[in-house]
Image: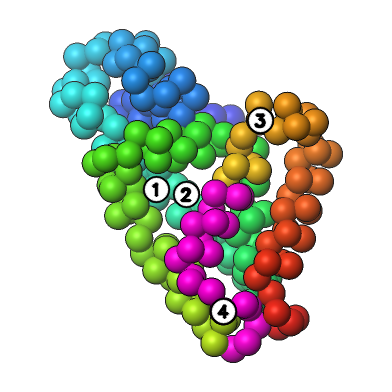
Amino acid sequence: MPSAAPALIPTRTRVLDAAVALFGTRGYEAASLDQVAEASGVRKQTVLYHFGDKEGLLGAVIDRSAADLAGALEAGLAGQGVGWERVEAVVRATFRLAARRPELLGLVREVSRLGGAPAVRLTTALEPLVHRATAFLDAEMAAGRMRPQDPRLVLLAAYSTVIGAATEVEVLRALGYPPTPRSVALRRTELLSFLRQALVLRDS
């Protein structure tokens, strides 16, 4: 199905798409509103009309990106089983997202780097997803299927490991993992093996 012509895409959506791409690849400070306007095919004044200023644009980008990330992970979990199968589904969904929309995960990393209010906004937006993941880990640990640990620390460690393995292309290239489909599949397999050994006590 052909993509919609730019004129048929709402202006606000075009600006958000351009901002996600620029903030997620160049960094928030390095990307200017002029560049966002040029990439979205509008005037800078149009960007300011919709978002007020650059911080307002970043806030809208964070909200949209958090919703997109949560939606992608939820879609990856749809129809999956229980226990380890759900962990594996999330990892696979993250790698698929990194392949399809690297700028989105790059934006998440950039917001984490910025810290402060932007990071708090992202954390707050993702809190329902984090709460569900924590409850899942609690239940798995209580059932004796996963090692008893602080579920929040497990989530933090898993998040850092999975996002890094899926997105740190240059670091991985330096370690001898060129960004080819075969190397990505190998990385995902090794990561899943590592996480399973770290988390699972016995097969569910």
Amino acid beneath label 4: Pro
- The reply to whether discs 1 and 2 touch (Cβ–Cβ < 8 Å) is yes
Residues in magenta, as a range = 143-162
Q: CA distance from mark 3 to mark 4?
A: 32 Å
Q: Which residue is mark 2?
A: 69
Q: Secondary structure at mark 3?
A: helix
Is tag 2's residue or tag 4's residue first in the polypeptide sequence?
Answer: 2
- Quarter of the image that includes the N terminus: top right
Residue 66: assigned label: 1
Amino acid beneath label 1: Ala
Q: Which residue is mark 4?
A: 148
Task: Check residue 149 for magenta coloring.
Answer: yes
Nearer the observer: mark 2 or 4; the answer is: 4
In the displayed structure, would residue 174 be above or below residue 89? above
- Please give the name of the residue rendered at 38% of the width and 16% of the height, measured from the top-left corner: 30
Amino acid beneath label 2: Leu
Q: Is residue 100 visible?
A: no
Q: Position of residue 16 (x, y in %)?
A: 35, 30
Q: Secondary structure at mark 1?
A: helix
Q: Position of residue 112 (x, y in %)?
A: 40, 40
Q: Is residue 176 left or right of residue 5?
A: right
Q: CA distance from mark 2 to mark 4?
A: 28 Å
Q: CA distance from mark 1 to mark 4?
A: 29 Å
Q: Main secondary structure of the magenta part?
A: helix
In the displayed structure, would residue 203 be above or below residue 25? below
Q: Position of residue 17 (x, y in %)?
A: 41, 29
